[in-house]
Amino acid sequence: METEKIYAMPFAKIYPLLVNKAVKKGRSTDEVNRVISWLTGYSAEAIAGAAASAITYGDFFRQAPAMHPNRALIQGTVCGVRVETIEEPLLRDIRALDKLIDELAKGRPMEKILRTAPDAQTAPPDTGRTYAFQAVIETAARGGAYVRFPHDLRRECGRGRARADITFDGAPYRGSIVNMGVKNADGSICYIIGIRKDIRAKIGKQAGDTIAVTAKLLDAPNVG
């Protein structure tokens, strides 16, 4: 599958192409890094580290610290396809970066590329809080699997259960963060997110594997 080939490409091979495309048009490497940082949450140092590592392009996005919520504003054609119509979330994020670098190379002002200008503020309000973290898949006593949410949910949003839009290594899922009797090593309450068998199969991960997780709370009244 063509998308799998894209995901498997080394970030070390893609990154110089992104930089060269912008630099040839008078932009700078720092500007490229700023665009990537805005979209993914990586620092410039982390981007440089990834470019010197063996991480794949797919994993670079799957492990992104915090994908920007305003990336939904990125629209237009790249590689012959309209970014906003791509159904696969991971591929859509990759093509969104392509689109941003295109805009950079074409001389668009940075504040508009980063969707911070007044005329770009058309995204739906982000009423929830998004968390990004690495987690180990664990097995439940009665079967199934879960990952631990590394925060006190009640402290974060004033309740012990919350619906959330979640991704596991980029695979989307709408579910809940709950307390199911699991405890942390210190005896404190641990909140968990179930990860279904079909999702584990889709991302090729099982119990004991580490995955990248994002969770955006949907019904947290005390989130500001």
Image: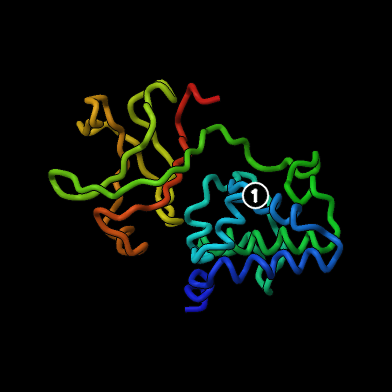
Display coloring:
rainbow
Q: Nearer the viewer, residue 198 or 59?
A: 59
Q: Residue at x 66, y 43 (%)?
A: 123
The image position of residue 42, as x and y in percent, is 58, 48
Q: Answer above or below: position of 189 versus 32.
A: above
Residue 173 in the figure: left or right of residue 84: left
List x then y, in percent, for residue 221.
Answer: 47, 23
Furthest residue in direction left, as rendered: 142
Residue drawn 72% across the image and 58% down it: 100
Q: Position of residue 49 (x, y in %)?
A: 56, 56
| Residue hosting label 1 | 44
> Judging from the image, what secondary structure is the residue with disc 1 in?
helix
State the count of labels. Answer: 1
Mark 1 Cα-neighbour bin, 10 Å: few <14, some 14–19, many ≥20:
some
Front in this rendered view, residue 206 or 34: 34
Query: Which image quadrant: the C terminus?
Result: top right
**Could you say which quadrant of the image residue 154 lies in?**
top left
Residue 48 horizontal side relative to residue 193, left or right: right
Residue 84 quadrant: bottom right
Instruction: Tell me which amino acid carries mark 1.
Output: Ala
At 63% from the left and 40% from the top, the residue drawn is: 124
> Residue drawn at (26%, 24%), measured in percent from left and top?
188
Q: Pinpoint residue 178: horizontal percent, then vertical percent.
A: 30, 34
Viewer-closest of 71 and 163: 71
Q: Residue furthest bottom?
A: 1
